[in-house]
Amino acid sequence: MVWSRLLFSVEWVTIDGWAILRVCRPRPQRHSGPASAGRALEPYMQSEIVVVRAESRPMEGVERPGPHQIYTNPRVSVEVRELDELSPHKIRVDMIYAGVCGTDVHAVQTNPRTGYIRCSAPLDIPSEGRIIGHEGVGKVLAVGSEVRHVKPGAIVTFESIIVCHFCDACRRGHFNQCHRAKLLGLEKDGVFGTVVDLPSLLTHDVSDLARSDTGLRAAACVEPAGVAYVACQNTQISGGDVVVIFGAGPIGLFTAMLCDSVFGASRVVIVEPVARRRELARKWCDEVYDVEEFFDELPSAKRGLACNVDVVVEASGDLSNVKRVFRCLSANSRVSLLARGGASLTLDSIDHMIANGIRLVGSRGHLGGAFADVLRLYRTGRMPLDAIVTDVVDGAEGLADLLNDPDRIVQEGCKVLADFSSTAEREERMHEPEQVGGPVDHAEELAPSNRRQEVERALLTPGRQV
């Protein structure tokens, strides 16, 4: 006789005439491949994960220190851990691709001036370490007992902000500003692992994009594209605007794409210190400059930017850019602050700000419909999400090696993905016909003029609240 339990199984065995009750703990393992969809899972499963540890040593004399004033000596390692029983409202995901964000880099990067990490975003590193990572795509292995909207076998991408739904900000629909929000991969364990458990409400089904490797890579990039989309909405970019974007990382590049193809900016300028990123940025802007080159030529009448900049998007983390460009902002212009670095913003042009009605706008998050809009833009061929991917590393080990040399990410690449799938799964994807996810099929179904009208009706609703 055998009883199956959640945590163990027991069975009677006979040894030398004695009846003995043996307790058996299931051997943990990772399921992968198509056969795992909808299949019953053992209660325990192993996951190879990337963990960050750091020493907690709050900076003296700082009343409310941020992570960049608390954590020192960051260390990255690869571990194998057992996943517990799946919670009722969570899903278990077999990761395919995970994206490296600038926040992940800053969590493992030390500021040589202070000795503390660079990350100023909300971050909690417990004694057992934090599984970082908040961008990616994977296959659902199992769902919790209370999950109804997603099924095993689905391919999903996920939001990274876990909101409470009960605070004043959430009640007003301002989910990106939830007072009790927890950030995936920073305050809650994230997606840098072979198998991870995630809140089911974060998921978006992108099974239609799994027909090709290009579609899967695009799905892994939806989260940063959503951040850029919300920033464009918050700064109310519209037809005719001259937009200057500082920083050609993933969010800066996605902002440039959106300014040009969706929000109707007349001129898009990118300012970026890294040569490789400048070359990549040329596809989606009218002009691209090194930082000092831009400011040296800014007052020149031939550039046509003096006192004629309508929108500044600061996505580099260097807030001195805002101070330096401020005098060139036109009447009723907007400045969007996106990148975090813990530095102070100082302005000496307050009279110019008041007289010209210039607005500073902080922008965080991707909630409020951005995921759905970005996915539609990709599916209709308007936003090539996968085009910013410059490097792919091999699983947890490759990702840990890269994070142990974080400067390499900034200097040599843009969007880096980690491929967590098995060798067999990779070979299977490589032999599938490349279809660019869904955009090619959908674009052929719609005439260009009809496609533009259909997308713009859905996306460019005046007065949309984020």
Image (cartoon, rainbow, N blue to C red):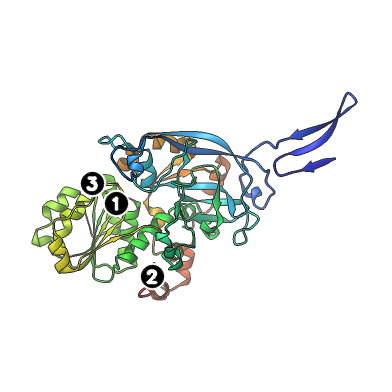
Q: Are marks 3 and 2 in contact (CB under 8 Å)?
A: no
> Dot 3 corresponds to which residue?
273
* Camera-nearest residue between 74 and 265: 74
Q: Earlier in the sequence, mark 3 or mark 1?
A: 1
Residue 22 numbered mark, or none: none
Residue plotted at (67% across, 53% down): 38
At 37% from the left edge and 62% from the top edge, which residue is drawn? 229
**Does residue 81 sit above or below 316 in this rendering?**
above
x 38%, y 58%: residue? 227
Near mark 1 (Cα within 10 A), the count class, few <14, some 14-19 or many ≥20, is many
Q: Are there few (<14), some (14-19), or many (20+) residues within 10 Å of tag 2?
A: few
Q: Nearer the viewer, mark 3 or mark 2?
A: 2
Q: Could you tell whether 368 is left or right of 17 in the image?
A: left
**In this figure, which residue is indicated by the disc labeled 1?**
248
For label 1, the SS is loop
Q: Nearer the viewer, residue 423 or 294?
A: 294
Q: Of label 2 and label 1, which has the lower sequence position?
A: 1
Between disc 3 and disc 2, whose residue precedes?
A: 3
In which quarter of the view is residue 421 placed?
top right
The type of residue carrying mark 2 is Gln
> Which marked residue is nearer to the observer: mark 2 or mark 1?
2
Is 90 placed above or below 449 here? above
Quarter of the figure with residue 153:
bottom right
Residue identifier under label 2: 465
On-image quarter of the N terminus? top right
- Relative to 347, 213 lies left or right: right
Does residue 89 show up? yes
- Mark 3 belongs to which amino acid? Pro
Q: Residues within 10 Å of mark 3 (few under 14, many from 20)?
A: some
Image-quadrant location for residue 52: top left
Q: Amino acid at mark 1?
A: Ala
